Amino acid sequence: KQVVTTEITEQIENAASHNPFKELEWKDIYFILGKLPPATRAVCTLFYMEDFKIKEIAAEMQLSEGTVKWHLNEGRNIFKKSLTKKDLY
């Protein structure tokens, strides 16, 4: 069980480090951020735009690190859906 948990945690952390906003223009970034629920928007903004670490976001927002990672994953999922539906244009 320890090996599986470690591998999943590493995969989540690797995925969280990818910044999906780097390839977009500011107007598109703000459009996508506007589609996110408030807490997810705050977490994604701190992580991707302000370069906060997961631990720092957790302390600032009084959330667990797991919850911060969940919000980052949720933000990426909504981001992907926006791109596949071509909602940006």
Image (spheres, rainbow, N blue to C red):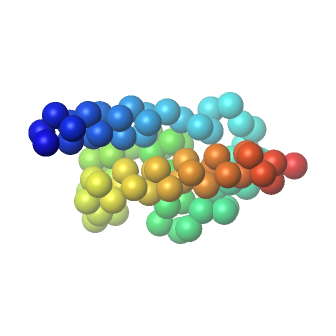
Residue 19, placed above or below residue 38: above
Picture coordinates of residue 21 (x, y %)?
62, 39
Residue at x 12% of width, y 39% of height: 2
The quadrant holding residue 8 is top left
User: Where in the figure is residue 52, as x and y percent of width and height?
Assistant: 39, 43
Q: Is residue 24 above or below residue 79?
A: above
The image position of residue 44, as x and y in percent, is: 50, 51
Taking depth in this image into account, of 60 and 34 the one nearest to the observer is 34
Left or right, 67 with reference to 20: left
- Residue at 56% in and 68% down: 37
Q: Is residue 55 above or below residue 3?
A: below
Can residue 43 be seen here?
no
- The residue nearer to you, when weighing 9 against 48, is 9
Q: Residue at x 66, y 62 (%)?
A: 35
Q: Position of residue 64 (x, y in %)?
A: 26, 59
**In the image, is 20 to the left or to the right of 60?**
right
Determine whether, in the image, residue 6 is placed left or right of residue 76: left
Tally of numbered tags: 0
> Residue 78 sits in which quadrant?
bottom right
Residue 49 visible in the shown view: yes
* Up-down relation of residue 18 to residue 81 (above or below): above
Choose top left, top right, bottom left or bottom right for residue 63.
bottom left
